[in-house]
Image: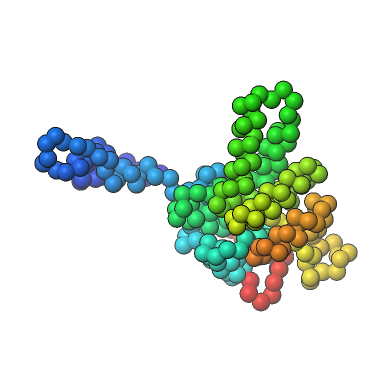
Amino acid sequence: MIAMTPTTEPTCRQCDDTGWVEQHPGQIPRRMQRCACFVQKHTRTYADGVPREFRDARLENYRAMPGNRAALRAARACLDGEDDLFLVGPIGSGKTRLACSVLNEHFLRTGSGLFIRTPKLLLDLQLLIVGDGKTVENRARDRDYCERLFSVSMLVLDDIGVEKPSQFTNRTLYTVYEERGDRGLRTIWTSNLGLARDPRFAPDDPRQTSTLGEFLGDDRLPSRIAGRAEIAFLDCPDQRLEDYSDVQPPYIWSGGDC
Ligand SMILES: [Zn+2]
C-alpha cells in the first residue's frame, strides 16, 4: 500500500486527478474522455482466479535461485511456445508463484487466463454432479463452467495430488485436459508429486515419494501430461520461511541443471 502524501498536489497533471480530460482541448462542444492515468489504475494486470498474493507475480520479478533456474527457463519457454508445463517441487518451493507469473504475463498479452486450485476444482465438479432438482439456469451455469475450462487460452491447475479425486473427478480432469489439448490450448500444472519415481532412491526406500499416478490410482492423466508438458523441478528451500539458512532442501531432483 502506498502511503498518502501530505500534499494537495494532484498526482496527474493531465486531469488533476479527476480521471477525465478533453478529447480535443479548446473545441466546443467539449467532449471528455477517460485520462490515461484512470485507465491504467483500473485495468486489471492479473488473470482470473489468481490469489491475492500472486497478483503482482511476473517472470521478471521471480526470484531466481540455483534450484529453480531450469524451471524458470521452462516457464519462459511455456509463455512463448506451445508446450504445457508441469512444475514439481515441495511445499513453498515457489511453483505456484512461477505458474502465476506465466499466467499473468499471458493475460497481459491476450486478456485471457484462469487459475484454479485443483482441490477447489474437484469440489466444484462434485457440485456439478449433484444434479437432481437443478433448474435450467443452474444447468446452463454448469455448462458455462465446463466450457470455460475447455476454452480459456491458458489454464493453471494448481496443486494436483493433494486431494484424492473420485473416479468421476479423475475422469473429468482427464477429459478437460484432453479437450484442451485437442483445441491447442495450454495448461500449467503444479504438484508436490512427480510423474515418475525419484531415481535416486530404491522403490522401497522410505524417502521415495509416491508418483502422481499412484496417488490418483490412475495413470492415464499423468501419462498424457508427460506426453504434452515440459516437466520442470523446483528444488528450493521453503521461500515462505524467513530464515532458512539451516534448512536443507527435502530432496534434490536433478543433479545437472537445478
Ligand atoms: Zn489523469
Say above or below: 8 vs 227. above
- Residue 116: x %, y % from top left: 61, 45
| Residue 232, quarter of picture | bottom right
Residue at the (50%, 55%) spot, across then down: 106
- Residue 247 seen in the current view: no
Residue at the (60%, 70%) spot, across then down: 70
Residue at the (80%, 57%) spot, across then down: 219
Left or right, residue 219 beside residue 68: right
- Residue 40: x %, y % from top left: 34, 47
Residue at the (52%, 44%) spot, across then down: 48
Say above or below: 133 vs 96. above
- Count of numbered circles on the image: 0
- Residue 82 seen in the current view: yes
Q: Residue furthest bottom?
A: 256
Left or right, residue 86 beside residue 217: left
Of 19 and 64, which appears nearest the observer?
A: 19
**Which color scheme is applied?**
rainbow
The quadrant in which the N terminus is found is top left
Left or right, residue 62 beside residue 200: left
Of 160 and 243, which appears nearest the observer?
A: 160
- Residue 242: x %, y % from top left: 57, 55
Of 3 and 170, which appears nearest the observer?
A: 170
- Residue 180: x %, y % from top left: 63, 52
